[in-house]
Amino acid sequence: MRGVYGSKQVTWAFQVFPRLILLGALAGGLAGLVVGGIGGRLAMWTVAVARGDTPSLHLDATMQMILEVTYRGIGVGVLYGLLRGLFAGSTRRRAVTFGAVLVLLMLGFALATNWRAEFSQSPLTVSIIAFAAVFFGYGVTVEGVLATLEKAIPAGRPSPLLASLYSSLAVPALIAGGLGLLIILIKDLIGGR
């Protein structure tokens, strides 16, 4: 598209920016489903066992939690895709750094919100380790999937069909990502869990 329109801004707007959004949404959604959703459910099960409760599995609640975490994962993945350039180094280094940043954010968030009550009802060490593993695993998985997608879908000048696909799908992905982040703010910061 740069050759057609002759502008670096047009190239970035129609090729680079949509690509970052789409790849971030895909990586974040996949990591949200597998690591955040399923891993988060396993972390809850682990905390219940450590607390001495009999863990139970309610399919409706589990599916709702997995879908919600997947949706949130899309939002975080889009944000990471756009900010990924701030994380220097190799894929492994970016993955570990992003995972560590998420763990630190999770710990700060847990101290500042209603998670304190949930953590106080269970063995604190088990809760922190279980959920830190989920957040760290999510960060590592997002970077790993994103790096794999970048290799599978090379950057550069896409065909006109691929460029229009990037452009048309980037808007819904950006909206989904924005709504996912908005859900995080509304539900968790205001207190509804």
Image (spheres, helix red, strand yellow):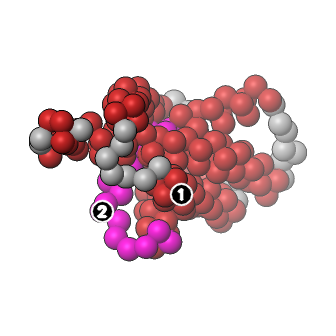
What is the x, y in percent for residue 98?
A: 45, 62
Left or right placement of residue 179 versus residue 10 in this view: right
Quarter containing the C terminus? top right
Neighbour class for label 1 at 10 Å: few (<14), some, many (≥20)? Answer: some
Task: Determine contact: label 1, label 2, CB under 8 Å.
Answer: no
Q: Which residue is mark 1?
A: 148
Q: Main secondary structure of the magenta part?
A: helix
**Residue placed at 85% from the left, 39% from the top?**
56
* Position above or below: 180 against 89: above
Residue in view at x 63 percent, y 32 percent: 67
- Identify the residue at image location x=47%, y=40%: 25
Stretch in magenta: 72-92
Residue in the picture at 60% in, 60% down: 137
Task: Please tell me whether residue 80 belongs to the stretch shown in magenta.
Answer: yes
Percent of width and height locating residue 132: 58, 61
On residue 86, the disc is: 2
Tell me the quarter of the picture where residue 19 sits. Answer: top left
Given the image, on which type of amino acid does mark 1 rest? Thr
Residue situated in front as seen by the camera: 15 or 123: 15
> Of the residues shown, which amino acid type is indicated by label 2?
Leu
Q: Secondary structure at mark 1?
A: helix
Which residue, as the protein is rendered here, is positioned at the far left? 7
Q: Which mark is residue 5?
A: none
